[in-house]
Image: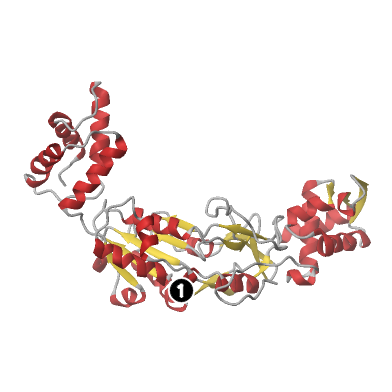
Amino acid sequence: MAQQAPAGSDFYPPAPKSVEETGLGMGFLTDLAIKIMYFEGNITGAQIAEEMKLPYAGVVDQLLEFLKREKLCEVKGTGGFAEASYQYAIAERGRAIAREALERSQYAGPAPVTLEDYTLSIHRQTVGNIVVHQRTMRQALSHMVIDEKTFSQLGPAVNSGRSLFLFGHPGNGKTAIAESIGKMILGDPMYIPYAIEIGSQVIRLFDNVNHVPAEGPVPARQIDPRWIRVQRPVIITGGELTLETLDLVYDPNNKYYEAPFQVKANGGMLLIDDFGRQQVRPRDLLNRWIVPLEKRVDFLTLHTGRKIEVPFDVLIVFSTNLAPRDLVDEAFLRRIRHKIEITDPSWEEYREIFRRVCEAKGVPYDEKALAYLIQEHYLKHNRERRSCHPRDLVDQLIDTARYLNVTPALSKELVDRACDAYFVEI
């Protein structure tokens, strides 16, 4: 069982010393072991323990004793004197049992943990325990030019560990701000299980795309190998998000589940990018979030119709270019803890962004050239400025210079050609 450490202290899942301490039934574990043997052929006890992510002594050795006693497997040889090096092979009677088990579920990976232990782990590792101060925020956002008002709003939003609504014109850095916040919370690793068990059903949680194993020293303790230490997850989803992907995804062929985005993001951040551009209607999507945002729990449905309750411990960030009034109503906005508008940069901020971009791209910065750009391509056309314009225009200018086989510089000709190619009147 997971260690019930006091809130705020380090959570760690101690290694089980017996089958009972895994929280799983003997039948479930022997089915899992025999499926692994069925797929692998000859395999040592140590290899079975590694596949199941369970200690050999006290757990896997007991499972193998049971399988031998029931004549479901047999010892085929040994690679050494240690019992864990004995080679096992599935017996004929075991093959029939394995096929029956595979009919119920094709899952043959790390042993899962119970939903109860998973829930406890999230409560002990809550994202709400992460505290960010001004200095940390300035370091995390130092690569961006952000006005003081916006900066002062972002810190409390991160410390809330709840919800954040970023809105404003496209190209002003909403996604970049959210990603920087995500990187900032990555320094505090957490433990997540490879999979969760509910009534003999398996939900796969860990995946290599959304979870990054944490580096650095690990506690000098015997950790339950069914858990993996990862950086706090930062999951970004956009136009592909649908209502179906927010529930358990059941694989009818393999007969186990994949956890949805918000469960994989527990303990970290979930960014809904380009909110309002999804295939599902924004109001339907928002209605799906109302209970989790308020109650901090989510309800998922098994393919049998059974409802299960899971923690919703996510800093959820909605980022949109659309006007809030076109997306949400008052009832939903009340449940969003922080609402922050990311505005167009001032001319002074635009200048600083342009200077930084030139420095990063190796293009000599020129105040007079910037003044020409602003006068001819912004003021004359009554054009709004965006934070992304300096980067895009300098890239465009470099592309043109390469084509003309000249050194990139803020000359009038290159500035004009870059602007003519970049700006489109809508």
Quadrant where the N terminus sits is bottom right
Residue at the left extreme?
380
Camera-side residue of 413 and 366: 366
Residue 282: x, y in percent? 34, 65
Residue 87: x, y in percent? 88, 48
Task: Give the vertical position of 398 relative to 51 (above or below).
Answer: above
Residue 238 visible? The answer is no
**Count of marks placed on residues:** 1
Residue 320 visible? The answer is yes
Could you say whether the residue bearing mark 1 is in a helix, strand or loop? helix
> What residue did someone put label 1 on?
292
Q: Is residue 16 left or right of residue 337?
A: right
Residue at the front extreme?
135
Graded by Cα atoms within 10 Å as few (under 14), some (14 to 19) or many (20 or more), the crowding at tag 1 reads: some
Camera-side residue of 134 and 103: 134
Residue 334: x, y in percent? 32, 77
Residue 127: x, y in percent? 49, 68
Task: Give the vertical position of 111 relative to 412 (above or below).
Answer: below
